[in-house]
Image (spheres, rainbow, N blue to C red):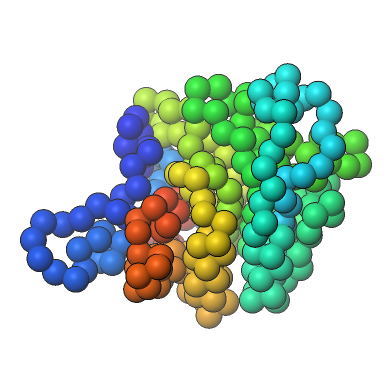
Amino acid sequence: MGTGRWAHLPFAALVRPGPGARRWLAQQHELVLAPTLRAWRETAAGPVAAQACAFGFDGLAKRDASLQSHFMRDTLPRLDRAEAEARMVAKKLRGVACLGMQATEQALRAAAPTASVLHVAGHALVDDEDSSRTALVLAPGHGDDGLLTLGEILELKLNAPLVVLSGCHTARGERFSGEGVGAIARCLLAAGAANVLATLAPVDDNKTQRFFEHFTEALAQGQAPATALARAQRAMLAQKSSAHPALWAGFVLHSVEGQRQR
């Protein structure tokens, strides 16, 4: 469980003293965070999930005044990898991809109850002090502004074993003493997700897609989320061009699966 300043620590990048090739904690263990000890539970099996669903939105769209008035942003930079990453995930998991202007709040709400894996690649607006200024950025449409707030996330009817948030700082948010971080990942767990993979830091467009290629390949082979995360981190470490901890240690897995999580 991460609480206080511990909530922002990438445990995977901790090292043990002394020589040895396997010095990183991620090379020795599969790491899982529980939001609180009370929340770590044995989850009951729900309805059979339909398929994986991946959302990719580059962040460029006409927006109403709420982006400036509520989130203090005028524009969002283009994400070159979001749609390509979502397409890759859907292909590897034999699922469906919602890309560009199809990646709406309405589409996500429709996919939430039956998705086996829900992967969201795009911008996240995260405020460590004020959770009302935190949201996932999706495409506007169907009467929605495309800013999926924490309150709206809590209303999702999730049954997904895994939700992936491939955006900057998606594991961050307001900190509560003894209760960890009340952010996007925590709200997804409360909405019914068993595991949420999120990020503590900014993500690199090119290297992030490579990370998720490794992660998704492991999932496609039937690996549990914690095992898939460890495999992806170790695969990044194995290549000199992606070995720096900034490129893999910020991905953290939040879980409420208790004894089922290996």
Q: Residue at x 88, y 42 (%)?
A: 141
In the visual, does 95 lie left or right of 61? left
Q: Which of 12/73 is in front?
A: 73
Residue 3 percent location from the top left of the image: 35, 34
Q: Quadrant of residue 146?
A: top right
Residue 220 percent location from the top left of the image: 57, 77
Residue 153 higher or lower than 80, as above or below? above
Q: Residue at x 54, y 35 (%)?
A: 183
Q: Quadrant of residue 243?
A: bottom left
Q: Residue at x 25, y 61 (%)?
A: 24
Q: Which of 106/116 is in front?
A: 106
Residue 228 percent location from the top left of the image: 46, 69
Numbered circles on residues, count: 0
Q: Which of 203/186 is in front?
A: 203
Q: Quadrant of the C terminus?
A: bottom left
Residue 90 percent location from the top left of the image: 69, 70
Residue 130 higher or lower than 159, as above or below? above
In the visual, does 38 lie left or right of 71? left
